[in-house]
């Protein structure tokens, strides 16, 4: 149980284009989903928290107009990196949570912007 | 400022021994603390959660302690195996369920 998927697992895009990453909870309803970014050899940094049907709450320093988050259903959240630049290249990981404190993480999406 | 420190970036131990990983924090009052395992290129996998009013939690070969006075958690893996080799992350949880992660300890269990 508690399986979270992400799609795509990796993506390469040109600078200036937008990329959408999907996060799905496969066997449970996720009232809250979280988006993290992880640079090599570093820990996970929380970018934003989203509750189903509400606007996402962004952490300090994360541009909400650049990282668009939509949590339209209890099983799907999307992160769109708009006008991506090479410095946005990173490992993006989502997690999902239902009523408890445990967060279940997706396998991550490796984004490379050329 | 808030800080989470996990002992040594890397820890090598011999198979069969007990691995002990440390997580210290400052300027936090977490409601709970979690430990995760992360393999290269993968998302973290939840292992254990311990609440602020709990001293110890066990699950199979894993044991976690939580000392809110010392502001420290210890994570033990008994009878370690090479398959336990991974990066282990501690994460502090707040009232809004957001997690703040430490930088991790890379554990290598030598056969």
Image (cartoon, coloured by chain):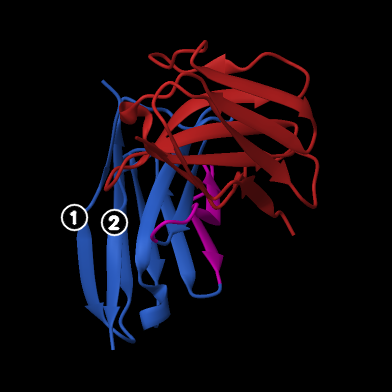
Chain colours: A red, B blue
The label shown at residue B8 is 1
Residue B50 sits inside the magenta stretch: yes
How far across and how far down the image is residue A73, in percent? 81, 30
How far across and how far down the image is residue B35, in percent? 46, 52
Q: Could you tell me which quadrant the N terminus of chain A lies in?
A: bottom right
How far across and how far down the image is residue A22, in percent? 65, 38
Q: Is residue A13 visible?
A: yes
Measured Cα–Cα span from mark 2 to mark 1: 6 Å
Q: Is residue B52 visible?
A: no
Q: Which region of the structure is painted magenta?
A: B40-59
Viewer-closest of B100 and A44: A44
Q: Is residue B52 left or right of residue B105?
A: right
Specify the subunit that label 2 lies on.
Answer: B
Residue A109 in the image: above or below residue B86: above
Residue visible at 62% across and 46% down in the picture? A6
Dot 1: what SS? Answer: loop
Residue visible at 68% across and 22% down in the picture? A70
In the figure, residue A110 lies in which quadrant? top left
Viewer-closest of B24 and A31: A31
The label shown at residue B105 is 2
How far across and how far down the image is residue A14, in percent? 41, 31
């Amino acid at each position: 149980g508690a399986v979270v998927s992400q799609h795509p697992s990796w993506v390469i895009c040109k600078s200036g284009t937008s990329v959408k990453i999907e996060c799905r909870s496969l066997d449970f309803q996720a009232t809250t989903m979280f988006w993290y970014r992880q640079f090599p050899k570093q820990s996970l940094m929380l970018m934003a928290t989203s509750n189903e049907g509400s606007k996402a709450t962004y952490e300090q320093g994360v541009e909400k107009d650049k990282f668009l988050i939509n949590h339209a259903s209890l099983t799907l959240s999307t992160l769109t990196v708009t006008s991506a630049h090479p410095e946005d290249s990173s490992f993006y990981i989502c997690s999902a949570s239902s009523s408890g404190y445990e967060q279940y993480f997706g396998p991550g999406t490796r984004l490379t912007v050329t | 400022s808030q800080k989470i420190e996990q002992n040594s970036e890397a820890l090598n131990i011999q198979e069969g021994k007990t691995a002990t990983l440390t997580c210290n924090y400052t300027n936090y009052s977490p409601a709970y603390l979690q430990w995760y395992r992360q393999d290269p290129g993968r998302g973290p996998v939840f292992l254990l959660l311990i609440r602020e009013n709990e001293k110890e939690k066990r699950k199979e070969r894993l044991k976690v302690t939580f000392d809110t006075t010392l502001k420290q958690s210890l994570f033990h893996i008994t009878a370690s195996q090479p398959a336990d080799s991974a990066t282990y992350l501690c994460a502090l949880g707040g009232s809004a369920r957001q997690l703040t992660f430490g930088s991790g300890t890379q554990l290598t269990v030598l056969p």
